[in-house]
């Protein structure tokens, strides 16, 4: 059986609430649900049972102290010149980059192909399509998005289940970081 996997940090409730407060005023945007808000460290994709188990075991070897993150601004990703994703930025830190590197190394040790995309810390807040109105005004109104720092105390291996109502993310294994 194949599993669609990714590794992510789940922001605390206060950060998710702050993001949800910004999810309005853009006709045609498909806003993420509260249960979908996360910062992806590594998208893995489809993995069969043995590979999924190897990934879970390899991720368990990551030893790092907890650290803090904060939201910083908003932006979008484009595909073929058209915006397709709105995101909230996450201030990059050396600890976040180190964790992403360690997750990448663990995935490779388990047998995953190397990630080819550059790590861009963000939390996806909406998916866009051709019916979405222009995003410039929304970006301008929300560009000041900032948050107080929050403690990152764990990261999680998730399984993504795609369905008619969008993706459902199921936590598979939660990995605690050491107290700072």
Image (cartoon, rainbow, N blue to C red):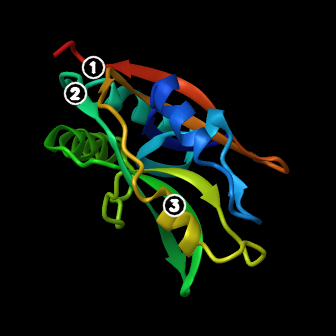
Q: Name the residue at 37% across, 44% down.
A: 146
Q: Count every numbered label the image shows and give the total.
A: 3
Considering only vertical position in the picture, is 46 above or below 178? below
Q: Name the residue at 21% across, 12% down.
A: 179
Please tell me which residue lies in front, 15 or 122: 15
Check disc 1: other Cα within 10 Å, few if <14, some if 14-19, many if 20+: some
Q: Residue 21: give x, y in percent of width and height.
A: 60, 40
Q: Which residue has dot 3 on it?
A: 141
Q: Are marks 3 and 2 in contact (CB under 8 Å)?
A: no
Q: Are marks 2 and 1 in contact (CB under 8 Å)?
A: yes
Quarter the C terminus occupies:
top left
* Front: mark 3 or 2: 3
Q: Which residue has dot 1 on it?
A: 177
Residue 156 seen anywhere in this rendered image of the structure:
yes
Q: Which residue has dot 2 on it?
A: 67
Considering only vertical position in the picture, is 112 above or below 159? below
User: Judging from the image, what secondary structure is the residue with disc 3 in?
Assistant: helix
Q: Which mark is residue 105?
A: none
Residue 49 seen anywhere in this rendered image of the structure:
no
Considering only vertical position in the picture, is 118 above or below 175? below
Please tell me which residue lies in front, 60 or 99: 99
Considering only vertical position in the picture, is 164 above or below 157? below
User: Judging from the image, what secondary structure is the residue with disc 1 in?
Assistant: loop
Q: CA distance from mark 2 to mark 1?
A: 9 Å
Quadrant of res 150: top left
Q: CA distance from mark 3 to mark 2?
A: 30 Å
Quarter the N terminus occupies:
top right
Q: Could you tell which of marks 2 and 1 lies nearer the N-terminus?
A: 2
Q: Name the residue at 57% across, 70% down.
A: 137
* Front: mark 2 or 1: 2
Q: Could you tell which of marks 3 and 2 lies nearer the N-terminus?
A: 2
């Amino acid at each position: 059986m194949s599993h669609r996997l990714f590794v992510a940090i789940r922001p605390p409730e206060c950060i998710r609430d702050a993001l949800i407060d910004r999810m309005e005023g853009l006709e045609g945007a498909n806003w993420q649900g509260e249960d979908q808000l996360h910062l992806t460290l590594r998208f893995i994709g489809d993995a069969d049972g043995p590979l999924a188990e190897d990934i879970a075991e390899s991720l368990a070897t990551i030893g790092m102290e907890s650290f803090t993150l904060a939201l910083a601004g908003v932006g979008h990703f484009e595909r073929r010149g058209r915006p397709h994703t709105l995101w909230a930025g996450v201030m990059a830190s050396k600890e976040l980059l180190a964790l992403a590197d360690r997750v990448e190394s663990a995935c490779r040790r388990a047998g995953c192909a190397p990630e080819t995309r550059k790590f861009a810390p963000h939390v996806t807040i909406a998916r866009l399509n051709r019916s979405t109105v222009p995003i410039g005004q929304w970006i301008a109104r929300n560009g000041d998005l900032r948050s107080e720092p929050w403690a990152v105390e764990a990261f999680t291996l998730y399984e993504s289940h795609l369905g008619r109502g969008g993706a459902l993310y199921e936590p598979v294994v939660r990995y605690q970081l050491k107290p700072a």
